Image (cartoon, grey):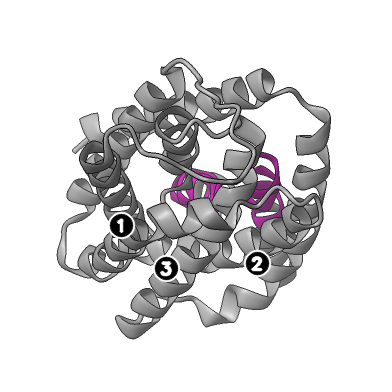
Amino acid sequence: MMPDVYYITVIFISLGAAFFSGLLGIGGGIIIFPAFLYLMPFLGFQTFTVNEITGIAAAQSLAGVFFAFVNHRKFGTVNLKLIKTVLPAGVTGALSGAVTAKYVSELALLLMYLFLLIIASVLILLPKAECANKDGGCTLDRPFITNLLIFAGTFVSGALGFAGAVTFIPILNHFCKVPVKVAISTTTLIVLISTALIFVGKAGVGLIPFDLLIFIIIGAVFGATLGAKLNRMLSPGVLRMVLLGVVITIGARIFLTILEY
């Protein structure tokens, strides 16, 4: 198949992943991972190892969430006080996981991915909780459990090449009582910081596909912008259900892959 078709396909996959970055505040890696694991071979392109895909996911996540953050910041819903509360556990987990992936098996990575999706599903289904506090503060009802969940989520996500936004959003909503849309916007900055560290970790162990970066960035610019605009149009309940649908769909496919090992 012609090289230009291959790179155009990479652009469109990145655009789709970045669209979900802007729409749901997730890094896009959670979409890129199954896309390169299943879609690229299905279309007749080269097959990547799971470890290589974690590097691709890190590159796309960084590009996608950067443009998602730029768009969400325009709406003024990024909560800086909240970020200071939860960022340390997130950064520690993300960086630790980023360098771990190179030393574990493909099956272990897939199991970690499935575990992350299950945890995310449970968190999303928790009753939403929003406080009336408008000063941007965040009081954790159960700080140990909250930070443990954040660390675990970002550690697993970091190993897979993304920063755990799929768990951050329901954690911020349920444990910090932050409105869903504020949680999504705030998560874009948290994930941007975490993903930058993951990218550095993946680059350090030679897992970043630098030849694909420009095509990933092109797709990310347009996808993240479209997603962020649609985010403003949809209700919080719809956004939660879209996030849950994405998680369940990917989780079911990963589970079938694990059964093949």
* Of the image marks 1 and 2, the number of the one nearer the N terminus: 1
Which amino acid lies under the numbered mark 1 shown in the image of this protein?
A: Ala
Disc 1 crowd rating (10 Å Cα; few below 14, some 14-19, many 20+) is: some
Which amino acid lies under the numbered mark 3 shown in the image of this protein?
A: Gly
> Residue at left 34%, top 77%?
201
Residue 1 x %, y %:
65, 63
Residue bearing mark 1 = 89
Q: Is residue 20 magenta?
A: yes
Residue bearing mark 2 = 216
- Badges 3 and 2: C-beta atoms under 8 Å apart? no
> Residue at left 41%, top 49%?
164
Which amino acid lies under the numbered mark 2 shown in the image of this protein?
A: Ile
Q: Nearer the viewer, residue 43 or 234?
A: 234
Element under disc 3: helix
Position of the C terminus, as image quadrant, is: top left
Residue 163 x %, y %:
43, 56
Element under disc 1: helix
Element under disc 2: helix
Q: Nearer the viewer, residue 97 or 145?
A: 145
Disc 2 crowd rating (10 Å Cα; few below 14, some 14-19, many 20+) is: many
Q: Label 3, label 1: how many angstroms apart (C-alpha)?
A: 22 Å
* Of the image marks 3 and 2, the number of the one nearer the N terminus: 3
The disc label shown at residue 55, or none = 3
Q: Is residue 2 magenta?
A: no
Within the image, what quadrant is residue 237 found in?
top right
Within the image, what quadrant is residue 8 found in?
bottom right
Q: Which residues are magenta?
A: 13-39
- Whether 18 is drawn above or below 129: the answer is below
Query: Is 112 on the left or on the right of 44, as rendered?
Result: left
> Residue at left 16%, top 67%?
103
Residue 239 x %, y %:
65, 27
Magenta-drawn stretch, dominant element (helix, strand or loop) = helix
